[in-house]
Image (cartoon, rainbow, N blue to C red):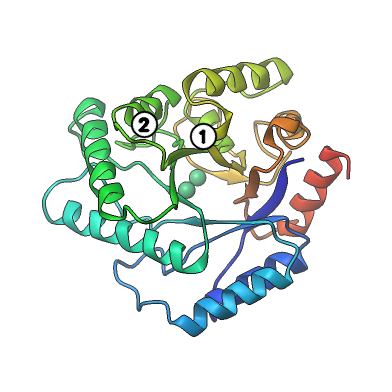
């Protein structure tokens, strides 16, 4: 069955994350391997990596996914592009050091140049970074986005286009964010909608490309293009879609990660609800 979990803080040291997730009963967690709002980070020391691996081994967490910095924009040009490509390669190396196989990436913003030129830049940038980190096995998961402003990735077809434009795309996958899909215009309410989305995913990517789900309800309406996460069952999507995901054997070893608000019922409440929806 699905691996239920949440995004966990690395405050105080990356090695503290597995225990934090474990104490919440997580089967998977997501972390940042560095400050997500800064370009540069001190390299991970061997002892930090060792402590992280030990803590992971001692926990009940099966999979850990990393989320890359919000600053990266592979659809940019000039200085920001150079920095983004270098920073993405660095994030892949950090994942490698920590034994993390999946790294979530926001495809980027086309900065007014349009989706066509933007997605071509993203594909070209990914190719460069993948070539440069050839010895790594870390997969880059392109995340579905809500389409706010000039954000790329609000349609599954757009992500499929990027993946297909690389000759060797074995290190590319997708991260399906429920709030972003819904805000991007996909109907997710009801079982029929769920089956429709999964059929699209199978047709465009195949189930194996899906490295993780981000389980977030949405404060805003379908098609609003606004990215506002809400507690599961308290937003516009409602519990049924989430129930379909966590109880579907096709997502047997797929991390299903919350990025819901920490206030209110918090992680405990959302995790308990997901376990109940899954049946245990
Ligand atoms: Zn994200
Ligand atoms: Zn979001």
Give the x, y percent position of residue 271: 76, 52
Q: Secondary structure at mark 2?
A: helix
Q: Residue at x 52, y 59 (%)?
A: 100
Mark 1: is the Cβ under 8 angstroms from ligand 1?
A: no
Q: Residue at x 51, y 76 (%)?
A: 49
* View extreme (left): residue: 78
Q: Quadrant of residue 83?
A: bottom left
In this orientation, does residue 169 appear?
yes
Indicate left or right for 98 with 127 as reference: right
- Establish if 187 lies above or below 277: above
Give the x, y percent position of residue 71: 32, 56
> Mark 2 sits on what residue?
163
- Establish if 214 lies above or below 90: above
Mark 2: is the Cβ under 8 angstroms from ligand 1?
A: no
> Mark 1 sits on what residue?
209
Residue 13, label in figure:
none
Classify mark 1: residues with Cα within 10 Å, few (<14), some (14-19) or many (20+): some
Q: Secondary structure at mark 1?
A: helix
* Marks 1 and 2 in Cβ contact (< 8 Å): yes
Q: Quadrant of residue 45?
A: bottom left
Task: Pick the residue in front: 276 or 17.
Answer: 17
In this orientation, does residue 11 appear?
no
């Amino acid at each position: 069955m699905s691996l239920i979990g949440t995004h966990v803080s690395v405050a105080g040291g990356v090695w503290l994350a597995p225990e934090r997730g474990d104490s919440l009963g997580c089967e998977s967690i997501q972390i940042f391997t560095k400050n997500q709002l800064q370009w540069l980070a001190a390299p991970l020391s061997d002892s930090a990596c060792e402590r992280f691996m030990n803590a992971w081994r001692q926990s009940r967490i099966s999979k850990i996914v990393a989320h890359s910095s919000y600053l990266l924009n592979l659809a940019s040009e000039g200085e920001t592009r150079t920095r983004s490509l270098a920073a993405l390669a660095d994030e892949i190396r950090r994942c490698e050091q920590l034994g993390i196989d999946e790294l979530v990436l926001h495809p980027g913003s086309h900065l007014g140049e349009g989706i066509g030129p933007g997605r071509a830049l993203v594909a070209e940038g990914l190719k460069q970074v993948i070539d440069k980190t050839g010895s790594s096995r870390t997969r880059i998961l392109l995340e579905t986005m809500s389409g706010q402003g000039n954000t790329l990735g609000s349609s599954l077809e757009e992500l499929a286009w990027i993946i297909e434009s690389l000759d060797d795309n074995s290190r590319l996958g997708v991260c399906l964010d429920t709030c972003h899909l819904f805000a991007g215009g996909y109907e997710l309410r009801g079982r029929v909608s769920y089956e429709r989305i999964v059929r699209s995913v199978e047709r465009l990517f195949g189930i194996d490309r899906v490295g993780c789900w981000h389980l977030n309800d949405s404060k805003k309406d379908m098609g609003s293009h606004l990215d506002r996460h809400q507690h599961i069952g308290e937003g516009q999507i409602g519990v049924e879609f989430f129930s379909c995901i966590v109880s579907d054997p096709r997502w047997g070893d797929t991390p299903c990660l919350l990025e819901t608000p920490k206030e209110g019922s918090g992680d405990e409440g959302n995790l308990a609800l997901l376990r109940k929806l899954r049946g245990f």
